[in-house]
C-alpha cells in the first residue's frame, strides 16, 4: 500500500531522550531502551494510545513509568507496538532480543565479517528497538555498549565517549552520549576488533577535532587518501559554506558488507569499505575519486542532513540533492571544474534521464511510495543537485551564500521540507521562485527545442525556444518550467561575440549570457551581429534538459574546436560522434568523413590542452547512451557500429595514438592529481583504440603495461583490453591477477566485473560459472554488484541478447536474493523496467521475466513496487 505526501501528519508524541543499552552478541543481542515521551503540542489528539514502529523484535519486557505492563495494556503486531491509555508525559522502557548474525538484509544491527554494525536510514532503527522511527522525531541519545572484550575491543556510537569499564565476566562496557538531538535514522553503533588511523583538525574558530578512521588491522595501510580527503572537505566547508564541525571527535568506520555507498550517522560515519580503502596498487583513479567525493558527501551531511534534517522521507532530496550539489562543488574546486561537470552530466544523462523516461519516473520530491528504499534514486540525488545548482546560478554566488546562511540559521535543529529550502532562497534574494518549485513537483525531463535564424538585413540573430515535457505515470500534463538557459554566440573567428538583446540599451560583455525561460515558447532577438554566428547553447549544462537544435556537422566541429565553454566543446564532440555512430547503425557501410579524423588528429596533437578534458572529448558515447537516442534500441547494431568506429580510429590515427601513448607513460610514483589522472586516462584511451585495431605493437605494450604497471589504474586498463580481446593472453592475465589479489576483496571485485562486462559472446556463460566460484557470495553486496549488476547494467550487448538468456539470469538472481536482501534485489529489478525501449521480441521476454518475479509469493514490497510499476504504467 502506498504512502502519500498529502497524508503527512505531525507525530502525536515526541521523544526528548533515549537511553539505550546493548548486550552485544552476533547470535543474540539484548537491547534495552528507555524513552522519554511527551504529547506533541502541535499535533491533533488521538485516541490515547501510542503506536511505535518495530520489526523483527522479540519483546522481553515492557514498563511504563517504572511499572511493568500487563499484556492487556499493549499489543504487539508484525510492524508495531501499541500501548493503551498513556499519559501526556511518560517513560517507556522495553527490552528486545535481536539476531545480528541472521540479519541478511543489512538494515538495523547486523554482522559484517567479525564486526557488528548498524545501518538505520531510512527505516532500520525499528529493527533495533521499538521507536517513533520517523525523521521529525528528534531526540538526545545515550548508548551503553557491552560486549566481549577480546572479540570486540572497540565499541563505538554517536557523540562523545563518556565512560568505560571492565565487567568481571570478560566483557567490557562503554558509554556514549550525543549532545545533538537527532532523528533515529542517524543512530549508529559499531563493535569489532578494529584499528584506527588518527589525525586531527583545527576548526576555523580554533577547536581541535580528533579524526579517526577505523578498519580491520590488515587495511591500516589503505587509509591515507581517505584521511586527506576528510581534512580537505572539512576545510572547504568552512571556506565555501561557513560550516564548522561541531563535536570533538569525528569517526569513520569501513565495513565490507554494505548496501549502499556510505552513511552520515552523527559523528560516526559508516562506509562501504570501497569508499575508504585505497593504495595506488589496489585502487584505480576512479576509486580514489569516489573516495574523495563520498568522504566529502557524508561529512557535508553533518550540516545538510543532520543539524537540519528532513521532515519526512518525501523530502529526501532536501538533504541528498543539496549534499550532492555540495560534494560536486567540492570536487570542482579541488580538482578540475570542467571535467567534473562532464562526468556529472554523463551520470545524469545515463541514469536520471533514463529513470525519468521509465515507469519508475518520479519527481525530485516524490508524492507517494510503497518502499522508501526504492527512492534513493538518481532523480532524488542527481536531479535534486541540478535543481539546487539552478537556484545557485539564478541567485549568483553572493546571494546564494546569503541564502544558504539564512537556511542554516533559520532551520538549525529542525526537520524541514524542500519548500522551506526554496523559501530561504526567495527570502534572501527577493525573487519569486513559485514557478521554479515545479522542478520539485513534476517528473520527466524537459525537452528544449531551439531554432535559430540570422537576418542579414537587420543583423539580427533570433532564437525560438520551445519547451515540452512528456507525460510520466500519474502526471499526464506538464506546466512549463522556469529555467536558466546559458548561451553564447561565436563569431567567424571562434570568439564569443558581445550579446545585445533587442531593446536593451547597451551590449553585454562578450561571453555567456543567461536567458530565463518561463513559457512554453519564447523568442529572443540578438541585434548588431555583423555575420551569422554559431550558437553555443545550454553552456555548462545550465539546466537538466534534453536539448535539440538545428546545426550542421560543420557547426559541431567548429564548436568542438573553439567554444570558450569547455563543457560545450565536449558536448559538441559527443553529438557529432553520436551522429556518426547512429548513421553507422542505420547503414553499416556509411562512411566517416575525413573532417572527423582531422579534428580527432588535431586534438591528439594539441600539446597545450588539458589531458583529462581531452580524454573526455575523445571518448565515444556509451552503447547504452546511444540506445537512448534511438526510437527502438538496436542492441546489436549499436555494438557493431561502436566497435567499427573504434577500430577505424585505431587504424587511421595509429601513429598519433602511439605517440600519445608513449608521451603519457607512467613516470615516477603514483600521484592523484588532475594532471596525472588526465595522463593515465588519455594514455589508456589511446591504447584502447589501438587494441581494437588489432595492432601488434599495441598488444605488446598492453601486455607490458599489465605486467609492469605500479598502479591499479594502468593494470586494470590493460587487463580490460586483454580480456575483451580474448584468447590465451586473456586467460593468463586473469589467472595471474587472481593469484596476486585473491586476498584483497575489493581488488577481487574488479576481477569479477572485468569478466562480467566484457562484450565477448561467451560472457554470460562465464558469469554463470563465476556464480559458483568459491569467492562469490550472494550475501556480499559488493560482490553481487561486481558480477551480477555489472553484467546487467554495464553490458548492454550481452545482457540484452535476443534469446532472453540475460533476462532469465537476472530474474533468477532477483528471486534468489529477495528473501535475503530485498534492497539489493529490488535494485536489480530496475534493469528490466525499461522494456518498452526495445523491439517486440525483447519486450515480450523482459515482461515475461517481470511477471515471473511477480508470481512468486511473499516477494518483498521493495521488489513488488518496482516490478508492478514496470508492468502497470501505460
Ligand atoms: N544517506 C546515505 C547517503 O549519503 C544513503 C543511505 C541510503 N540508505 C538506504 N537504505 N537507502 O547518501
Ligand atoms: Zn547522502
Image (tube, rainbow, N blue to C red):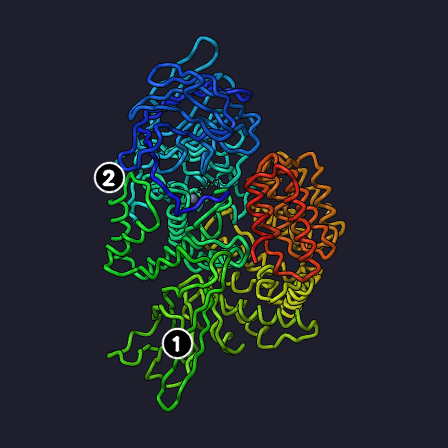
For the residues labelled 2 and 1, say whether their Cβ atoms are less than 8 Å apart: no
Which residue sits furthest right? 728
Residue pointed to by mark 1:
489
Classed neighbour count for the residue bearing mark 2: other residues with Cα under 10 Å, few (<14), some (14–19), many (≥20): few
Callout in the foreground (2, 1)? 1
User: Residue 620 location in percent, x, y?
Assistant: 58, 63
Depth check: give the residue in front, 426 or 531.
426
Question: Does the rendering let one see residue 654?
Answer: no
The residue furthest top is 168
Write down which quadrant ligand 2 falls in: top left
Q: Is residue 292 left or right of residue 525?
A: right
Q: Nearer the viewer, residue 532 or 49?
A: 49
- Residue 304 in the image: state x and y as whole percent: 35, 44
Residue drawn where x is 59% and y is 73% of the image: 597
Question: Helix, strand or loop at disc 1?
Answer: strand
Q: Which residue is mark 2?
A: 205
Using the rendered view, name the quadrant where residue 583 is placed. bottom right
Position above or below: 64 against 699 = above
Amino acid at each position: 500500500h502506498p504512502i502519500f505526501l498529502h497524508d503527512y501528519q505531525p507525530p502525536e508524541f515526541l521523544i526528548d531522550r533515549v537511553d539505550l543499552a546493548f548486550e552485544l552478541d552476533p547470535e543474540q543481542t539484548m537491547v534495552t531502551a528507555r524513552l522519554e515521551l511527551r504529547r506533541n503540542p502541535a499535533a491533533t489528539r488521538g485516541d490515547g494510545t501510542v503506536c511505535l514502529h518495530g520489526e523483527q523484535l522479540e519483546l522481553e519486557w515492557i514498563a511504563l513509568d517504572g511499572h511493568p505492563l500487563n499484556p492487556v495494556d499493549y499489543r504487539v503486531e508484525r510492524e508495531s507496538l501499541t500501548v493503551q491509555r498513556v499519559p501526556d508525559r511518560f517513560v517507556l522502557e522495553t527490552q528486545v532480543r535481536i539476531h545480528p548474525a541472521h540479519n541478511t538484509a543489512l538494515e538495523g544491527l547486523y554482522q559484517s565479517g567479525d564486526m557488528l554494525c548498524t545501518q538505520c536510514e531510512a527505516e532500520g532503527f525499528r529493527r533495533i528497538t521499538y521507536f517513533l522511527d520517523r525523521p521529525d522525531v528528534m531526540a538526545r541519545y545515550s548508548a551503553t555498549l557491552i560486549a566481549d572484550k577480546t572479540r570486540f575491543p572497540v565499541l563505538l556510537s554517536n557523540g562523545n565517549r563518556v565512560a568505560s569499564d571492565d565487567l568481571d565476566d570478560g566483557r567490557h562496557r562503554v558509554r556514549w552520549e550525543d549532545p545533538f538531538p537527532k532523528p533515529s535514522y542517524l543512530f549508529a553503533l559499531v563493535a569489532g576488533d578494529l584499528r584506527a588511523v588518527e589525525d586531527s583538525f583545527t576548526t576555523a574558530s580554533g577547536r581541535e577535532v580528533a579524526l579517526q578512521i577505523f578498519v580491520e588491522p590488515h587495511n591500516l595501510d589503505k587509509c591515507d587518501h581517505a584521511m586527506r580527503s576528510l581534512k580537505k572537505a572539512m576545510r572547504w566547508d568552512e571556506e565555501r559554506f561557513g560550516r564548522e564541525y561541531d563535536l570533538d571527535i569525528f569517526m569513520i568506520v569501513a565495513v565490507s558488507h554494505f548496501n549502499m555507498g556510505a552513511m552520515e550517522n552523527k559523528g560516526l560515519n559508516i562506509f562501504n569499505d570501497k569508499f575508504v580503502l585505497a593504495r595506488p596498487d589496489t585502487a584505480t583513479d576512479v576509486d580514489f575519486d569516489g573516495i574523495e567525493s563520498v568522504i566529502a558527501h557524508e561529512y557535508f551531511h553533518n550540516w545538510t542532513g543532520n543539524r537540519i534534517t528532513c521532515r519526512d522521507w518525501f523530502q529526501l532530496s532536501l538533504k541528498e540533492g543539496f549534499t550532492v550539489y555540495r560534494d560536486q562543488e567540492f570536487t570542482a574546486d579541488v580538482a578540475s571544474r570542467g571535467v567534473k561537470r562532464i562526468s556529472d552530466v554523463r551520470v545524469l544523462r545515463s541514469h536520471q534521464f533514463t529513470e525519468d523516461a521509465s515507469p519508475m519516473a518520479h519527481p525530485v520530491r516524490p508524492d507517494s511510495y510503497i518502499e522508501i528504499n526504492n527512492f534513493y534514486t538518481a532523480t532524488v540525488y542527481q536531479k535534486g543537485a541540478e535543481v539546487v545548482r539552478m537556484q545557485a546560478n539564478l541567485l549568483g554566488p553572493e546571494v546564494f551564500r546569503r541564502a544558504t546562511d539564512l537556511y542554516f540559521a533559520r532551520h538549525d535543529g529542525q526537520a524541514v521540507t524542500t519548500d522551506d529550502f526554496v523559501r530561504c532562497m526567495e527570502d534572501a534574494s527577493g525573487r519569486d521562485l513559485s514557478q521554479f518549485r515545479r522542478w520539485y513537483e513534476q517528473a520527466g525531463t524537459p525537452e528544449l527545442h531551439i531554432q535559430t535564424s540570422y537576418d542579414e538585413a537587420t543583423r539580427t540573430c533570433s532564437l525560438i525556444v520551445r519547451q515540452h515535457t512528456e507525460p510520466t505515470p500519474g502526471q499526464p500534463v506538464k506546466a512549463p518550467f522556469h529555467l536558466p538557459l546559458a548561451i553564447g554566440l561565436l563569431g567567424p573567428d571562434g570568439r564569443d561575440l558581445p550579446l545585445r538583446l533587442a531593446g536593451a540599451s547597451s551590449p553585454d560583455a562578450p561571453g555567456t549570457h543567461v536567458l530565463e525561460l518561463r513559457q512554453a515558447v519564447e523568442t529572443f532577438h540578438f541585434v548588431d551581429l555583423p555575420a551569422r554566428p554559431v550558437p553555443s547553447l545550454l553552456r555548462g549544462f545550465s539546466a537538466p534538459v534534453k536539448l535539440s537544435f538545428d546545426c550542421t556537422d560543420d557547426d559541431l566541429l567548429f564548436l568542438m574546436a573553439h567554444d570558450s565553454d569547455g563543457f560545450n566543446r565536449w558536448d559538441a564532440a559527443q553529438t557529432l560522434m553520436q551522429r556518426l555512430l547512429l548513421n553507422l547503425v542505420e547503414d553499416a557501410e556509411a562512411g566517416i568523413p575525413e573532417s572527423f579524423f582531422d579534428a580527432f588528429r588535431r586534438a591528439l596533437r594539441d600539446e597545450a590542452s588539458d589531458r583529462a578534458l581531452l580524454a573526455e572529448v575523445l571518448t565515444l558515447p556509451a552503447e547504452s547512451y546511444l540506445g537512448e537516442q534511438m526510437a527502438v534500441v538496436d542492441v546489436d547494431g549499436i555494438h557493431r557500429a561502436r566497435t567499427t568506429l573504434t577500430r577505424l580510429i585505431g587504424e587511421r590515427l595509429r601513429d598519433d595514438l602511439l605517440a600519445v601513448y608513449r608521451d603519457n607513460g607512467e613516470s615516477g610514483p603514483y600521484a592523484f592529481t588532475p594532471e596525472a589522472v588526465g595522463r593515465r586516462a588519455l594514455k589508456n584511451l589511446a591504447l584502447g583504440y589501438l587494441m581494437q585495431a588489432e595492432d601488434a605493437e599495441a598488444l605488446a605494450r598492453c601486455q607490458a603495461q599489465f605486467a609492469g604497471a605500479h598502479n591499479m589504474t594502468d593494470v586494470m586498463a590493460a587487463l580490460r583490453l586483454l580480456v575483451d580481446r580474448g584468447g590465451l593472453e586473456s586467460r593468463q592475465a586473469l589467472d595471474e591477477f587472481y593469484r596476486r589479489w585473491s586476498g584483497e576483496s575489493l581488488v577481487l571485485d574488479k576481477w569479477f566485473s572485468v569478466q562480467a562486462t566484457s562484450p565477448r559472446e561467451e560472457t554470460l556463460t562465464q558469469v554463470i560459472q563465476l556464480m559458483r566460484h568459491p569467492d562469490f557470495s550472494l550475501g556480499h553486496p559488493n560482490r553481487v554488484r561486481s558480477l551480477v549488476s555489472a553484467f546487467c547494467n554495464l553490458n548492454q550487448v550481452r545482457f540484452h541478447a535476443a534469446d532472453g538468456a540475460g533476462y532469465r539470469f537476472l530474474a533468477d538472481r532477483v528471486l534468489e536474493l529477495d528473501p535475503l536482501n530485498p534492497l539489493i534485489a529490488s535494485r536489480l529489478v530496475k534493469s528490466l523496467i525499461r522494456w518498452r525501449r526495445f523491439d517486440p521480441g525483447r519486450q515480450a521476454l523482459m515482461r515475461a521475466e517481470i511477471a515471473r518475479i511477480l508470481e512468486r509469493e511473499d516477494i518483498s514490497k521493495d521488489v513488488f513496487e518496482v516490478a508492478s510499476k514496470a508492468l502497470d504504467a501505460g
